[in-house]
Amino acid sequence: TSGATLERCAVVTASARTRPPVRPLGIYVHLPFCQKKCDYCYYLSYIAQSAAVVNQYLETVVRELALYSKRPGVQGRPLSFVYFGGGTPSSLSSTQVRYLVDGLRRGLAWGGIDEVTFECAPRSVSQEFVETLRDIGVTRLSMGVQSFDDELLRLNGRVHLAEDVARAYALIRQADFAWVNLDLMCGLIGETEEQWRESVRRAIELEPDSVTVYQTE
């Protein structure tokens, strides 16, 4: 055996014993449940499901993460962020949210996590629910406003009105989240440029930490 071959073998053996650089993971948790499906929505979601169906789904998500957490590409890696999207994640009860988060934490360590984002819809926001989100470590709350024009909201199948946004936003700010985001949609069915400018103005007036703008498809 040549010296060069022995040297290569030594390098391979040392590499096998050395853990590769640990890169953080991000997790997206899809919660596909809604009170009503908006007319423009193409995301996977189910309407008015029973608590038993939702609980079964949550149990499955927890079991699935437990399986992934044992795989070499996942095991031992720290979490950078967790994002709860939907659907309407805020359609869950506080008990269901706590069950889900406890299960996810058993699968992967949350120590040192940078961001936990939770999406919510205005009408499903309550003081108890936002306090639950704060307790489980949510750092960024994102509310789907879409428009401040009641006529447009009705025309596009939204279940909330502008007054629901104001009520929910006040509760969210009282809970003192590190970051609050508002979603707006441009190009809604029937929307005029004047209505769009007014929605932007009212979003700025609330002084959120950020605004995400989506174009209706």
Image (cartoon, helix red, strand yellow):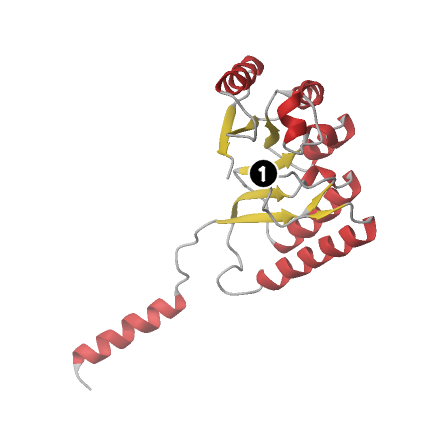
Q: Is residue 1 above or below residue 188?
A: below
Q: Residue at x 67, y 24 (%)?
A: 172
Name the outermost residue toward the bottom. Answer: 1
Image quadrant for the N terminus? Answer: bottom left
Of residues 86 and 113, the one drawn nearer to the viewer in this rendering: 86
Residue 26, above or below 212: below
Q: Position of residue 139 (x, y in %)?
A: 59, 32
Residue at the far front: name it: 190
Q: Is residue 121 left or right of residue 95?
A: left
Residue 36, image x, y percentages: 72, 40
Secondary structure of residue under mark 1: strand
At 55% from the left edge and 49% from the top edge, which residue is drawn? Answer: 27
Drawn side of residue 114 relative to residue 125, left or right: left
In the rendered image, residue 104, in percent from the top left (x then y), is placed at: 65, 51
Which image quarter: residue 141?
A: top right
Can residue 176 be seen here? The reply is: no
The amino acid sitting under disc 1 is Val
Which residue is at the front of the view, 6 or 160?
A: 160
Q: How many marks?
A: 1
Mark 1 surroundings within 10 Å by alpha-carbon count, few (fewer than 14), some (14 through 19), many (20 or more): many
Q: Position of residue 92 (x, y in %)?
A: 75, 41
The answer to whether 186 appears left or right of 21 in the picture is: right
Circle 1 residue: 116
Q: Is residue 182 visible?
A: yes
Residue at the image point whose x is 70% and y is 18% from the top: 163
